[in-house]
Image (cartoon, rainbow, N blue to C red):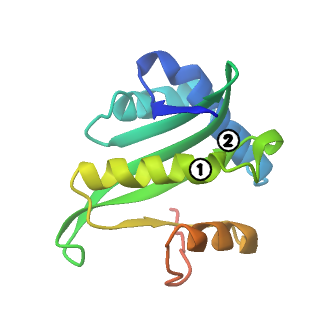
Amino acid sequence: MPTIRLATARDQDVAIDLVRRLLTELGGTPASAEAMAPVFGRFAADGPAGFVVLAEDDGRFVSVCTVSFVEALRSVGRYAIIQEMYVDPSVRSSGVGMEVLRFALEHAVSRGCGMVELGTPYQGERQIQFYQRAGFANVGARLRWRP
């Protein structure tokens, strides 16, 4: 069984590598590791911006989940957004992803979050089913605007 834990500053390279793998798999062009490093620093060690969860199996990191904190009137305070969730293809459907997700959800609640949201890829039916098995409700699409 994998070891699941919060990332610390020393996990920067592996966490960024896993996120970059996710973005590449989704067809995007990830930012450089150097550009991502300062953001990771605000999440490492359960920082004020959020946290990062890692899963390690037999000395190899196989999953990452990044969670950011936000506040809104509708949530009556703090809630969390799962920003990136990646499971190495070699361990998909093994239960690792669900363990990482549950760890992240429990930790978000322990940090005062009364709600957790996320978005899925455009053609993300498999991902939607995964999150629904974990108790998420499909409440609509996430849209994006950039200047």
Q: Can residue 29 be seen?
A: no
x, y percent for residue 67: 43, 49
Q: Do the residues labelled 2 and 1 touch (CB within 8 Å)?
A: no
The three-letter code of the residue at mark 1 reads Met
Residue type highlighted by circle 2: Pro
Q: Which residue lies furthest to the right in this view?
A: 90
The foreground one among 41 and 103 is 103
Q: Name the residue: 35% across, 33% down.
A: 42
Which mark identifies residue 52?
A: none
Q: Which of marks 2 and 1 is nearer the N terminus?
A: 2
Which residue is depicted at the point 64% across and 72% down? 128
Disc 2 is placed on an element classified as loop
Vertically, is 75 above or below 82? below
Q: Is mark 1 on a helix, strand or loop?
A: strand
Task: Residue 16: give x, y in percent of width and height.
Answer: 59, 31
* Residue 79 sits above or below residue 31 on the image: below
Q: Where is residue 110 in the image (x, y as percent from the top left)?
A: 25, 50
Q: Within the image, what quadrant is residue 72 found in?
A: bottom left
Residue 74 in the image: above or below residue 102: below
At label 1, counting other C-alpha atoms closer than 10 Å, the crowd grade (few under 14, some 14-19, many 20 or more) is: many
Residue 35 is situated, as x and y percent measured from the top left of the image, at 54, 30
Task: Provide the residue designation for mark 2.
Answer: 30
* Residue located beneath label 1 in the image: 85
